[in-house]
């Protein structure tokens, strides 16, 4: 219950920032590439239940959107690089948190088709779905998973988080995430 209250509090703050910045970000996205401002995609939630995740669109609309994103993916737009680096592209997910589909902290939600493949290829992969997916997480602080091997490493971090999750651990993850965002902005 306490975690849910914290999720609601922080997602309300995030929603205020999302609404306050929507118009300038929407204009930047529309002026630099064709397509919708928001990107929505079915992802795997807690207990394997699918939900629709929302993000600012950071990629061109041409090409497949149901594949892994590489660090220097050519589909990422110029403004998309900035939105991803500052994590501003994630702000619309505050709506997912308010709806109870996500939490502030937890394993990042996978695309449905990718999660299905990973469940078949990696033992215990489905265990990461026993908690709500998160806006940020322990694994995101340590590894960018764009390959099967990196995903195996990411799973180790996700399982560690699940085993040791607590409000104090969540606070540590949130503070480290904020620190990473601020340090990027300072570059």
Image (tube, rainbow, N blue to C red):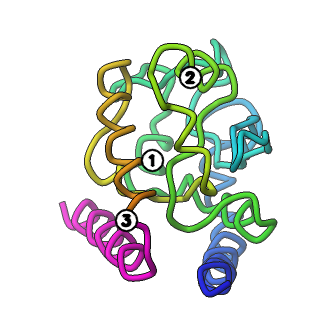
The residue tagged 2 is 119
Image quadrant containing the N terminus: bottom right
Query: Which label was assigned to residue 84?
Result: 1
| 41 in the magenta segment | no
Q: Front-most of 25 and 13?
A: 13
**How many numbered marks does the figure carry?**
3
Magenta stretch, residue numbers: 164-187
Quadrant in which the C terminus is drawn:
bottom left
Query: Residue 100's image quarter?
Result: bottom right
Q: Looking at the rendered structure, which numbered label has been put on residue 164? A: 3
Q: Which mark is residue 144?
A: none
Disc 2 to disc 1: CB gap under 8 Å: no
Residue 10 picture location, percent across and down: 59, 81
Task: Name the element at disc 2.
Answer: helix
Q: CA distance from mark 2 to mark 1?
A: 27 Å
Left or right, 9 with reference to 164: right
Classify residue 51 as left or right of residue 118.
Answer: right
Q: Is residue 184 magenta?
A: yes
Residue 64: x, y in percent?
64, 14
Q: Residue at x 39, y 38 (%)?
A: 155
Q: Residue at x 64, y 41 (%)?
A: 57
Q: Is residue 8 above or below residue 107?
A: below
Q: Identify the residue shown where x is 44% and y is 21%.
A: 122
Q: Residues within 10 Å of mark 3 (few under 14, many from 20)?
A: few
> Mainly helix, strand or loop, the magenta region?
helix
Tell me whether circle 3 and circle 2 mark residues in contact (CB < 8 Å). no
Say which element carries label 1.
Answer: helix
Q: Position of residue 157 (x, y in %)?
A: 33, 47
Between discs 1 and 3, the one toward the N terminus: 1
């Amino acid at each position: 219950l306490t975690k849910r209250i914290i999720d609601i509090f922080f997602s309300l703050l995030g929603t205020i920032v999302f609404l306050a910045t929507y118009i300038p970000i929407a204009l930047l996205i529309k002026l630099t590439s064709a397509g919708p401002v928001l990107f929505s995609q079915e992802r795997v939630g807690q207990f394997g239940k699918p939900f629709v995740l929302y993000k600012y669109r950071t990629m061109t609309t041409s090409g497949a959107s149901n594949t892994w994103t590489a660090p220097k993916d050519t589909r990422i737009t110029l403004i998309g690089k900035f939105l991803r680096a500052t994590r501003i592209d994630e702000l619309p997910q505050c709506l997912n948190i308010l709806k109870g589909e996500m939490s502030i902290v937890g394993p990042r939600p996978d695309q449905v088709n990718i999660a299905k493949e990973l469940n078949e290829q990696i033992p215990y992969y489905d265990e990461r779905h026993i908690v709500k997916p998160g806006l940020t997480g322990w694994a995101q602080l340590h590894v960018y998973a764009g390959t099967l091997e990196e995903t195996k490493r990411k799973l180790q971090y996700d399982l560690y988080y699940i085993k040791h999750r607590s409000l104090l651990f969540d606070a540590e993850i949130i503070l480290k995430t904020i620190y990473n965002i601020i340090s990027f902005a300072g570059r």
